[in-house]
Amino acid sequence: MYAITGATGNIGSKAAEILLAKGEKLRVIGRDAVSLRKFVNKGAEAAVGDLKDTAFLTRAFSGVDAVFAMIPPDLSSADFRGYQNDIGRSIYDAITKAGVKFVVNLSSQGAELPAGTGPILGLHDQELRMNRLVGVNVLHLRPTYFMENLLMNIPLINQMGVAGSAVRGDLKFAMIATRDIAVRVADHLVERDFSSKVVEDLLGQRDLSLEEAIGVIGHRIGWPDLKYVQFPYDDAAKGMVAMGISPDLSRLFIEMSMGLNNGLFAVNCSRTMENTTPTAIEAFADVFAEAFHATVLKKAA
């Protein structure tokens, strides 16, 4: 049996679907029983509770062969770094108490850096924390920038007719579809093909700029003239707060954008067959188009 934290998120949900399709026994972990029901209907066990509750998480991890561990984002957290450390410590303690021997830990490009990466610093801390586990094999997956982050542009496109963020539009960097991360998660859980403490980079299909990505997406949604705009850092932060992201996390996102703009991570990475994944931006554009057109239909209704 395998346990999936963040089972309703972009990666956890896809990994759960892959494992269930293979006939694997699965325990999905989340805070909302209704959101987990689709997995239960396909044969999974549901563990409903708060990841900060170490006793609950220990029970959820007990008797499993391997765990997919991640710190789900809390966009409203007034102290996001404190939230990350609370969840991270609970995961660490539950792994120890439940006797888990294999863990696939979701980290990120830039997690090797001790500063200048915004919310990624919490994943740096978690890697260090997990490396202290005794007798536990841990694989730190370090994927790059999620293509799904581009979905945050949909309200902006609808309201202003442009896409944008604080990241430079002309900067080429690695981008990945979360489906490809989920495939690796599921494979590693089943194979348990890692030992001690190891790192695996995931760099997506190719490097591309946000101008290029939005250009592909614009053509796919029927907006061939759609432009990408780099916003000043202060304006970008205010925009995130207006979207409901806490001021603290907005500040951290700006720090991460600065780090990306300065080439601290995800830029000019060495590619191999192992760290290159198959989904291209052209394929992800179909996912974007479906989500975008759903908002258009909702507005028209």
Image: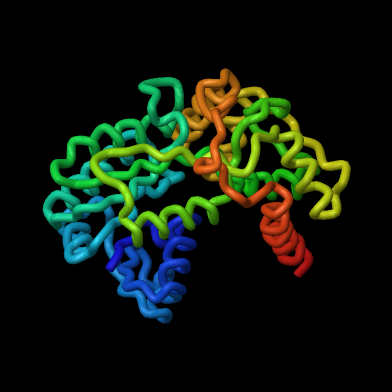
> Residue 27, percent across and down?
31, 68
The residue positioned 59% from the left and 32% from the top of the image is 238
* Among the 4 quarters of the image, the one containing residue 258: top right
Name the image quarter holding the N terminus.
Answer: bottom left
In the image shown, does 103 or 77 lie closer to the viewer?
103
Visible residue check, residue 87: no
User: Which residue is farthest front?
Assistant: 273
Is 243 situated left or right of 90 in this image?
Answer: right
Indicate whether 223 appears above or below 271.
Answer: below
In this rendering, position of residue 146 left or right of residue 187: right
For image coordinates 72% across by 41% down, the residue present is: 213
273 and 263: which one is in front?
Answer: 273
Q: Residue 203: image x %, image y %?
A: 55, 39
Could you say where residue 234 lies in the image, as x and y percent from the top left?
A: 60, 24
Q: Quadrant of residue 113?
A: top left
Q: Please count the marks in the image.
A: 0
Q: Is residue 254 visible?
A: yes
Q: Quadrant of the C terminus?
A: bottom right
Model colouring: rainbow
Residue under the point 57% across and 30% down: 237
On screen, residue 60 versus residue 296, left or right, reads left
In the image: residue 107, left or right of residue 133 = right
The percent position of residue 142, horizontal first and vertical second, equals 43, 39
Q: Among all residues in the image, which is located at the extreme right?
A: 225
Relative to residue 106, is residue 25 depicted above or below? below
Q: Nearer the viewer, residue 275 or 156?
A: 275
- Residue 210 vertical position relative to residue 205 in the rendered view, above or below: above
**Residue drawn at point x = 21 percent, y = 45 percent:** 92
